[in-house]
Image (cartoon, rainbow, N blue to C red):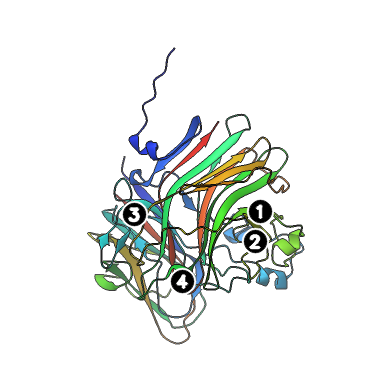
Amino acid sequence: MRQFMTSTVEQRKDFKESFSTHPMEVAWASEAIFFITIEEVKCKGARLKPKVQISVDGVNWIDEGTVFEPLAERGQYFKRITHFGGWLRLYIEMEGDDPLFNLTIHLVMKE
Amino acid sequence: MDRILSYDSGLSKFKPLKHILCYDDFDKGLCGWLNLMPNYTQEGFKPNFVQRGATEEDKEKMLDKTQWGPIMLSSATYRFPGTHGSMDGIYSLKLATRPTANRYEQPPAAGSISHAIKRLTSHRKPGLLQFEVWFTYTPEQDRPGLSEKDIRAFGICFDLQDAKSRNFVGIRYVNSVNGEMKREWQYMQSSDVTDEEWTYGTKGNWHKKGVDPFWYGRRYPDGRTDGFKFIPNSYQELCYNESDDKINWMYLRFLYDTEKKEYVEMQSRDQIFDLRGIRATDAPPYLGIEGLVNPVMWIETDCDRRVFLYIDSLVISTE
Protein backbone atom coordinates (compact mmCIF):
# COMPACT_ATOMS: atom_id res chain seq x y z
CA MET A 1 0.00 0.00 0.00
CA ARG A 2 1.14 3.56 -0.60
CA GLN A 3 1.93 5.92 2.29
CA PHE A 4 -0.49 8.82 2.67
CA MET A 5 -1.05 11.79 4.95
CA THR A 6 -3.35 14.81 4.90
CA SER A 7 -2.37 17.63 7.22
CA THR A 8 -4.47 20.64 8.13
CA VAL A 9 -1.60 23.11 8.15
CA GLU A 10 -3.79 26.17 8.78
CA GLN A 11 -7.23 25.85 10.31
CA ARG A 12 -10.08 28.39 9.94
CA LYS A 13 -7.86 31.27 10.84
CA ASP A 14 -8.24 34.97 10.04
CA PHE A 15 -5.33 36.36 8.03
CA LYS A 16 -4.91 40.08 7.41
CA GLU A 17 -1.38 40.27 6.07
CA SER A 18 1.04 38.22 3.95
CA PHE A 19 2.13 35.00 5.66
CA SER A 20 3.72 31.61 5.17
CA THR A 21 2.14 28.30 6.21
CA HIS A 22 3.43 25.90 8.88
CA PRO A 23 6.65 24.37 7.44
CA MET A 24 6.01 20.72 6.59
CA GLU A 25 8.59 17.96 6.20
CA VAL A 26 7.71 15.96 3.12
CA ALA A 27 10.89 14.00 2.29
CA TRP A 28 8.98 10.70 2.43
CA ALA A 29 6.42 11.76 -0.19
CA SER A 30 6.86 12.12 -3.94
CA GLU A 31 3.67 13.98 -4.71
CA ALA A 32 1.61 16.59 -2.91
CA ILE A 33 -1.40 18.85 -3.34
CA PHE A 34 -1.97 22.15 -1.53
CA PHE A 35 -5.68 22.84 -1.04
CA ILE A 36 -6.71 26.37 -0.08
CA THR A 37 -10.23 26.90 1.25
CA ILE A 38 -11.38 30.49 1.50
CA GLU A 39 -13.95 30.02 4.25
CA GLU A 40 -14.94 33.67 4.49
CA VAL A 41 -14.07 36.92 2.74
CA LYS A 42 -14.22 39.71 5.30
CA CYS A 43 -12.96 42.52 3.06
CA LYS A 44 -13.63 44.20 -0.26
CA GLY A 45 -11.28 44.29 -3.22
CA ALA A 46 -8.34 42.47 -1.62
CA ARG A 47 -6.77 39.38 -3.19
CA LEU A 48 -4.58 36.45 -2.18
CA LYS A 49 -1.53 35.54 -4.26
CA PRO A 50 -0.31 32.12 -3.03
CA LYS A 51 2.90 30.46 -4.23
CA VAL A 52 4.70 27.24 -3.35
CA GLN A 53 8.11 27.37 -1.66
CA ILE A 54 10.75 24.70 -0.98
CA SER A 55 13.67 24.61 1.45
CA VAL A 56 16.84 22.76 2.38
CA ASP A 57 16.34 23.12 6.13
CA GLY A 58 12.83 24.41 6.86
CA VAL A 59 14.22 27.85 7.73
CA ASN A 60 15.47 29.34 4.44
CA TRP A 61 12.87 29.24 1.64
CA ILE A 62 12.88 29.80 -2.11
CA ASP A 63 10.12 29.87 -4.72
CA GLU A 64 9.41 26.50 -6.33
CA GLY A 65 7.69 28.02 -9.36
CA THR A 66 4.10 26.89 -8.78
CA VAL A 67 1.75 29.84 -8.25
CA PHE A 68 -2.02 30.13 -7.80
CA GLU A 69 -4.01 32.62 -9.81
CA PRO A 70 -5.00 35.57 -7.57
CA LEU A 71 -7.90 34.49 -5.32
CA ALA A 72 -10.69 36.67 -3.93
CA GLU A 73 -13.86 34.56 -3.68
CA ARG A 74 -15.06 31.91 -1.24
CA GLY A 75 -14.27 28.43 -2.46
CA GLN A 76 -11.70 25.65 -2.70
CA TYR A 77 -8.58 25.84 -4.84
CA PHE A 78 -5.62 23.49 -5.36
CA LYS A 79 -2.21 23.01 -6.95
CA ARG A 80 -0.32 19.76 -7.56
CA ILE A 81 3.41 19.59 -6.82
CA THR A 82 6.13 16.98 -7.43
CA HIS A 83 9.92 16.69 -6.98
CA PHE A 84 10.11 19.03 -4.00
CA GLY A 85 12.85 17.59 -1.76
CA GLY A 86 12.42 17.68 1.99
CA TRP A 87 10.17 20.65 2.82
CA LEU A 88 7.07 22.45 1.54
CA ARG A 89 5.11 25.55 2.48
CA LEU A 90 2.95 28.20 0.84
CA TYR A 91 3.76 31.87 0.91
CA ILE A 92 0.55 33.88 0.55
CA GLU A 93 0.86 37.50 -0.37
CA MET A 94 -2.07 39.79 0.37
CA GLU A 95 -2.87 42.51 -2.13
CA GLY A 96 -5.29 45.42 -1.79
CA ASP A 97 -6.70 47.54 1.03
CA ASP A 98 -7.39 46.05 4.48
CA PRO A 99 -7.38 42.38 3.51
CA LEU A 100 -9.11 39.93 5.87
CA PHE A 101 -9.69 36.33 4.88
CA ASN A 102 -10.61 33.27 6.92
CA LEU A 103 -8.64 30.34 5.49
CA THR A 104 -8.12 26.62 5.85
CA ILE A 105 -5.11 25.09 4.12
CA HIS A 106 -4.53 21.37 3.67
CA LEU A 107 -1.39 19.65 2.45
CA VAL A 108 -2.07 16.21 0.99
CA MET A 109 1.01 13.99 0.64
CA LYS A 110 1.43 10.58 -1.01
CA GLU A 111 4.26 8.17 -1.68
CA MET B 1 -1.00 -25.27 20.46
CA ASP B 2 2.46 -23.74 20.84
CA ARG B 3 2.86 -20.25 19.47
CA ILE B 4 6.17 -18.75 18.47
CA LEU B 5 6.27 -14.97 18.07
CA SER B 6 9.16 -13.37 16.27
CA TYR B 7 9.64 -9.68 17.13
CA ASP B 8 11.34 -6.93 15.22
CA SER B 9 14.89 -6.36 16.54
CA GLY B 10 13.99 -2.69 17.06
CA LEU B 11 12.00 -3.83 20.10
CA SER B 12 15.17 -4.81 21.95
CA LYS B 13 15.72 -1.19 23.00
CA PHE B 14 12.39 -1.25 24.91
CA LYS B 15 11.30 -3.27 27.91
CA PRO B 16 7.62 -3.91 27.28
CA LEU B 17 5.15 -5.63 29.57
CA LYS B 18 3.80 -9.03 28.47
CA HIS B 19 1.27 -7.85 25.89
CA ILE B 20 2.39 -5.30 23.30
CA LEU B 21 -0.51 -3.18 22.14
CA CYS B 22 1.51 -0.95 19.78
CA TYR B 23 5.05 -0.92 18.50
CA ASP B 24 5.16 2.22 16.37
CA ASP B 25 8.34 2.81 14.38
CA PHE B 26 7.80 5.94 12.32
CA ASP B 27 9.98 4.63 9.53
CA LYS B 28 6.85 2.63 8.73
CA GLY B 29 4.49 5.61 8.56
CA LEU B 30 2.19 7.58 10.85
CA CYS B 31 0.96 4.48 12.77
CA GLY B 32 -2.35 6.16 13.60
CA TRP B 33 -0.99 9.29 15.33
CA LEU B 34 -2.71 12.55 14.49
CA ASN B 35 -3.21 16.14 15.58
CA LEU B 36 -5.37 16.71 18.64
CA MET B 37 -8.40 18.83 17.72
CA PRO B 38 -11.72 19.87 19.29
CA ASN B 39 -15.04 18.24 18.32
CA TYR B 40 -16.47 20.06 15.29
CA THR B 41 -20.08 19.09 15.99
CA GLN B 42 -21.95 22.40 16.17
CA GLU B 43 -23.88 24.37 13.53
CA GLY B 44 -21.48 25.24 10.71
CA PHE B 45 -19.05 22.61 12.09
CA LYS B 46 -18.07 24.94 14.91
CA PRO B 47 -16.24 23.28 17.85
CA ASN B 48 -18.40 22.13 20.78
CA PHE B 49 -16.43 23.20 23.85
CA VAL B 50 -18.85 26.03 24.50
CA GLN B 51 -21.91 25.00 26.56
CA ARG B 52 -25.22 26.61 27.44
CA GLY B 53 -24.79 29.45 29.89
CA ALA B 54 -21.56 30.74 28.34
CA THR B 55 -21.66 34.50 27.76
CA GLU B 56 -19.94 36.28 24.88
CA GLU B 57 -17.33 37.42 27.38
CA ASP B 58 -16.74 33.80 28.44
CA LYS B 59 -16.41 32.71 24.83
CA GLU B 60 -13.76 35.34 24.22
CA LYS B 61 -11.77 34.18 27.26
CA MET B 62 -11.86 30.53 26.19
CA LEU B 63 -8.61 28.94 25.16
CA ASP B 64 -8.20 28.64 21.38
CA LYS B 65 -7.64 24.92 20.86
CA THR B 66 -7.89 24.97 17.07
CA GLN B 67 -4.41 26.26 16.26
CA TRP B 68 -1.98 23.76 17.83
CA GLY B 69 1.06 23.03 15.64
CA PRO B 70 0.59 20.18 13.14
CA ILE B 71 2.62 16.97 13.43
CA MET B 72 4.58 15.41 10.56
CA LEU B 73 6.97 12.65 9.57
CA SER B 74 10.46 14.12 9.87
CA SER B 75 13.87 13.30 8.45
CA ALA B 76 15.43 15.65 11.06
CA THR B 77 17.18 17.69 8.37
CA TYR B 78 19.11 20.86 9.28
CA ARG B 79 21.06 23.58 7.50
CA PHE B 80 24.60 22.49 8.41
CA PRO B 81 24.70 18.72 9.07
CA GLY B 82 21.99 17.86 6.54
CA THR B 83 19.91 14.84 7.43
CA HIS B 84 20.18 13.49 10.97
CA GLY B 85 17.62 10.74 10.39
CA SER B 86 16.22 8.55 13.16
CA MET B 87 17.57 5.68 15.29
CA ASP B 88 16.71 2.88 12.90
CA GLY B 89 16.38 4.72 9.62
CA ILE B 90 15.32 8.12 8.33
CA TYR B 91 11.93 9.02 9.81
CA SER B 92 10.55 10.02 13.18
CA LEU B 93 7.26 11.57 14.25
CA LYS B 94 7.77 15.30 14.77
CA LEU B 95 5.53 17.49 16.91
CA ALA B 96 6.07 21.11 15.87
CA THR B 97 4.65 24.15 17.69
CA ARG B 98 3.94 27.46 16.02
CA PRO B 99 6.30 30.37 16.82
CA THR B 100 4.29 31.95 19.62
CA ALA B 101 4.05 31.81 23.40
CA ASN B 102 2.56 33.65 26.36
CA ARG B 103 4.44 34.05 29.61
CA TYR B 104 4.38 30.83 31.61
CA GLU B 105 1.86 32.01 34.22
CA GLN B 106 -0.71 32.86 31.52
CA PRO B 107 -2.92 30.39 29.62
CA PRO B 108 -0.95 28.89 26.70
CA ALA B 109 -1.08 30.93 23.47
CA ALA B 110 -2.94 29.49 20.49
CA GLY B 111 -0.39 27.36 18.65
CA SER B 112 2.24 27.31 21.42
CA ILE B 113 1.74 23.55 21.93
CA SER B 114 1.85 20.65 19.49
CA HIS B 115 0.10 17.40 20.43
CA ALA B 116 -0.08 13.95 18.91
CA ILE B 117 -2.77 11.45 19.89
CA LYS B 118 -3.57 7.86 19.02
CA ARG B 119 -7.07 6.51 19.74
CA LEU B 120 -7.38 3.05 21.30
CA THR B 121 -9.63 1.23 23.75
CA SER B 122 -8.92 -1.28 26.52
CA HIS B 123 -9.22 -4.97 25.70
CA ARG B 124 -7.71 -6.56 28.82
CA LYS B 125 -8.60 -6.63 32.51
CA PRO B 126 -7.36 -3.57 34.44
CA GLY B 127 -3.72 -3.74 35.48
CA LEU B 128 -0.35 -2.33 34.47
CA LEU B 129 -0.17 -0.10 31.41
CA GLN B 130 3.12 1.24 30.05
CA PHE B 131 4.21 3.93 27.58
CA GLU B 132 7.82 3.88 26.31
CA VAL B 133 9.38 6.28 23.80
CA TRP B 134 12.74 7.01 22.26
CA PHE B 135 12.67 10.78 21.74
CA THR B 136 14.69 13.93 21.28
CA TYR B 137 13.91 17.66 21.02
CA THR B 138 15.26 20.93 19.67
CA PRO B 139 14.01 24.38 18.65
CA GLU B 140 13.94 25.54 15.05
CA GLN B 141 17.46 26.71 14.17
CA ASP B 142 16.28 30.10 12.92
CA ARG B 143 18.84 32.12 14.89
CA PRO B 144 22.40 31.47 16.10
CA GLY B 145 23.25 30.26 19.57
CA LEU B 146 22.37 27.41 21.90
CA SER B 147 18.64 27.63 22.48
CA GLU B 148 17.78 24.93 25.00
CA LYS B 149 15.96 27.46 27.18
CA ASP B 150 13.38 28.14 24.47
CA ILE B 151 11.73 24.75 25.04
CA ARG B 152 9.23 25.04 27.89
CA ALA B 153 8.03 21.49 28.48
CA PHE B 154 7.16 18.16 26.88
CA GLY B 155 5.45 15.03 28.08
CA ILE B 156 3.62 11.77 27.53
CA CYS B 157 0.33 10.65 29.07
CA PHE B 158 -2.73 8.45 28.80
CA ASP B 159 -6.29 9.73 28.54
CA LEU B 160 -8.31 6.86 30.07
CA GLN B 161 -11.94 6.24 30.87
CA ASP B 162 -13.80 3.37 32.54
CA ALA B 163 -17.38 3.18 33.84
CA LYS B 164 -16.49 5.28 36.90
CA SER B 165 -14.14 8.04 35.83
CA ARG B 166 -12.04 9.75 33.23
CA ASN B 167 -8.35 9.90 34.16
CA PHE B 168 -5.47 11.82 32.66
CA VAL B 169 -2.22 10.31 33.92
CA GLY B 170 1.27 11.11 32.72
CA ILE B 171 4.55 12.91 33.15
CA ARG B 172 6.20 15.99 31.75
CA TYR B 173 9.67 17.50 31.77
CA VAL B 174 9.62 21.18 32.69
CA ASN B 175 12.67 22.33 30.80
CA SER B 176 12.39 26.08 31.28
CA VAL B 177 10.03 28.70 32.66
CA ASN B 178 10.14 32.16 31.07
CA GLY B 179 13.69 31.49 29.85
CA GLU B 180 15.01 30.12 33.16
CA MET B 181 16.11 26.49 33.07
CA LYS B 182 14.19 24.17 35.45
CA ARG B 183 15.02 20.61 34.23
CA GLU B 184 12.57 18.85 36.57
CA TRP B 185 9.96 16.14 36.10
CA GLN B 186 6.30 16.44 37.05
CA TYR B 187 3.29 14.10 37.22
CA MET B 188 -0.30 14.88 36.29
CA GLN B 189 -2.55 15.40 39.28
CA SER B 190 -5.08 18.16 39.77
CA SER B 191 -5.21 20.60 42.65
CA ASP B 192 -8.44 21.13 44.56
CA VAL B 193 -9.97 23.74 42.25
CA THR B 194 -13.36 24.18 40.59
CA ASP B 195 -14.12 23.40 36.95
CA GLU B 196 -14.33 27.14 36.36
CA GLU B 197 -10.90 27.77 37.90
CA TRP B 198 -9.51 24.82 35.91
CA THR B 199 -10.57 26.49 32.63
CA TYR B 200 -9.09 29.91 33.44
CA GLY B 201 -12.27 31.34 34.92
CA THR B 202 -14.62 30.57 32.03
CA LYS B 203 -18.23 29.57 32.64
CA GLY B 204 -20.02 27.17 30.30
CA ASN B 205 -16.77 25.50 29.32
CA TRP B 206 -17.20 21.86 28.32
CA HIS B 207 -14.14 20.77 30.27
CA LYS B 208 -14.10 19.27 33.77
CA LYS B 209 -11.29 19.57 36.29
CA GLY B 210 -8.58 17.02 35.49
CA VAL B 211 -9.31 16.89 31.75
CA ASP B 212 -6.61 18.10 29.31
CA PRO B 213 -4.03 19.24 31.89
CA PHE B 214 -1.46 19.90 29.14
CA TRP B 215 -3.26 23.20 28.53
CA TYR B 216 -5.74 23.65 31.44
CA GLY B 217 -5.04 24.36 35.11
CA ARG B 218 -3.66 27.68 36.30
CA ARG B 219 0.13 28.00 36.02
CA TYR B 220 2.52 29.38 38.65
CA PRO B 221 5.89 31.11 38.13
CA ASP B 222 7.82 28.29 39.84
CA GLY B 223 6.72 25.81 37.14
CA ARG B 224 3.80 24.17 38.95
CA THR B 225 0.29 24.20 37.55
CA ASP B 226 -3.09 23.19 38.95
CA GLY B 227 -2.69 20.07 36.77
CA PHE B 228 0.93 19.08 37.49
CA LYS B 229 3.05 18.56 40.59
CA PHE B 230 6.83 18.23 40.81
CA ILE B 231 8.28 14.77 41.41
CA PRO B 232 10.56 15.20 44.46
CA ASN B 233 14.30 15.20 43.71
CA SER B 234 13.67 14.90 39.99
CA TYR B 235 16.16 17.46 38.69
CA GLN B 236 17.77 15.79 35.68
CA GLU B 237 20.00 17.07 32.92
CA LEU B 238 19.05 15.55 29.60
CA CYS B 239 21.41 15.33 26.62
CA TYR B 240 20.69 18.52 24.70
CA ASN B 241 24.13 18.51 22.99
CA GLU B 242 26.13 21.60 21.99
CA SER B 243 24.16 22.98 19.07
CA ASP B 244 20.48 23.22 18.04
CA ASP B 245 21.11 20.90 15.07
CA LYS B 246 22.61 18.00 17.06
CA ILE B 247 20.08 15.60 18.50
CA ASN B 248 20.59 12.56 20.73
CA TRP B 249 17.87 9.94 21.11
CA MET B 250 16.77 9.36 24.72
CA TYR B 251 14.63 6.77 26.48
CA LEU B 252 11.52 7.57 28.54
CA ARG B 253 9.13 5.13 30.21
CA PHE B 254 5.92 5.69 32.19
CA LEU B 255 4.19 2.90 34.13
CA TYR B 256 0.63 3.18 35.52
CA ASP B 257 -1.78 0.79 37.23
CA THR B 258 -5.31 1.06 35.78
CA GLU B 259 -6.73 -1.27 38.44
CA LYS B 260 -5.54 0.74 41.45
CA LYS B 261 -5.69 4.01 39.47
CA GLU B 262 -2.24 4.76 40.82
CA TYR B 263 1.08 5.72 39.34
CA VAL B 264 3.87 3.13 39.58
CA GLU B 265 7.10 4.64 38.24
CA MET B 266 8.81 6.53 35.46
CA GLN B 267 12.23 6.12 33.90
CA SER B 268 14.22 8.78 32.06
CA ARG B 269 17.47 7.53 30.52
CA ASP B 270 18.84 5.21 33.27
CA GLN B 271 17.16 6.97 36.19
CA ILE B 272 14.00 5.50 37.73
CA PHE B 273 11.60 7.61 39.82
CA ASP B 274 9.24 5.77 42.18
CA LEU B 275 5.70 7.14 41.85
CA ARG B 276 3.79 4.53 43.84
CA GLY B 277 0.97 5.88 45.98
CA ILE B 278 0.19 8.80 43.68
CA ARG B 279 -3.50 8.69 42.81
CA ALA B 280 -4.96 9.64 39.48
CA THR B 281 -7.39 12.56 39.46
CA ASP B 282 -10.95 11.39 38.81
CA ALA B 283 -13.06 13.43 36.41
CA PRO B 284 -16.67 12.38 35.73
CA PRO B 285 -16.99 10.04 32.72
CA TYR B 286 -17.72 11.77 29.40
CA LEU B 287 -20.41 10.36 27.10
CA GLY B 288 -19.43 7.86 24.43
CA ILE B 289 -15.81 7.15 25.36
CA GLU B 290 -15.95 4.25 27.83
CA GLY B 291 -12.90 2.03 27.56
CA LEU B 292 -10.80 4.90 26.18
CA VAL B 293 -7.02 4.33 26.11
CA ASN B 294 -5.53 7.28 24.27
CA PRO B 295 -1.78 7.79 24.46
CA VAL B 296 -0.86 11.47 23.99
CA MET B 297 2.48 13.26 23.52
CA TRP B 298 3.08 16.99 23.45
CA ILE B 299 5.63 19.81 23.50
CA GLU B 300 5.28 23.50 24.36
CA THR B 301 7.44 26.45 23.33
CA ASP B 302 8.59 29.09 25.81
CA CYS B 303 9.02 31.94 23.32
CA ASP B 304 8.38 33.18 19.78
CA ARG B 305 9.94 30.25 17.95
CA ARG B 306 8.92 26.75 16.89
CA VAL B 307 10.14 23.87 19.02
CA PHE B 308 10.12 20.22 18.00
CA LEU B 309 9.65 16.89 19.80
CA TYR B 310 10.83 13.93 17.72
CA ILE B 311 9.72 10.36 18.46
CA ASP B 312 11.81 7.65 16.81
CA SER B 313 9.58 4.82 18.00
CA LEU B 314 7.34 3.86 20.91
CA VAL B 315 5.74 0.89 22.61
CA ILE B 316 2.44 0.71 24.50
CA SER B 317 2.12 -2.49 26.51
CA THR B 318 -0.04 -4.10 29.20
CA GLU B 319 0.42 -6.95 31.66
| Image: B194 above or below B294 | below
Among numbered discs 2 and 1, the one appearing first in the sequence: 1
Q: CA distance from mark 2 to mark 1?
A: 8 Å
Crowd band around label 1 with a 10 angstrom C-alpha radius: few (<14), some (14–19), many (20+)? many
The chain ID associated with circle 4 is B
Q: Nearer the viewer's eye, disc 3 or disc 1?
A: 1
Residue at the farthest bottom position: A97
Are discs 4 and 3 both within one chain?
Answer: no
Where in the figure is residue B221, as x and y percent of width and height? 63, 71
Dot in front, 2 or 3: 2
* Callout 2–callout 4 Cβ contact below 8 Å: no
Residue at mark 2 to residue at mark 3: CA–CA distance: 33 Å
Instruction: Inspect the image, locate mark 1, and give the three-letter code of the amino acid beneath it.
Output: Val
The vertical placement of B241 against B100, above or below, is above
- The subunit carrying tag 1 is B
- Is residue B266 toward the left or the right of residue B283 in the image? left
- Residues at marks 3 and 1, common chain? no
Amino acid type shown at disc 4:
Pro
Task: Give the mark nearer the N terminus: 4 vs 1.
Answer: 4
Out of A77 and B54, give the one closest to the viewer.
B54
* Residue found at x 55% / y 68%: B110
Q: Are marks 4 and 3 in contact (CB under 8 Å)?
A: no
Mark 2 belongs to which subunit? B
Determine the secondary structure under disc 4: loop
Label 2 and label 4: CA atoms lie apart by 20 Å
Residue under circle 2?
Answer: B216
- In the rendered picture of this protein, how many numbered marks are placed on residues? 4
Mark 3 packing: few (<14 Cα in 10 Å), some, or many (20+)? some
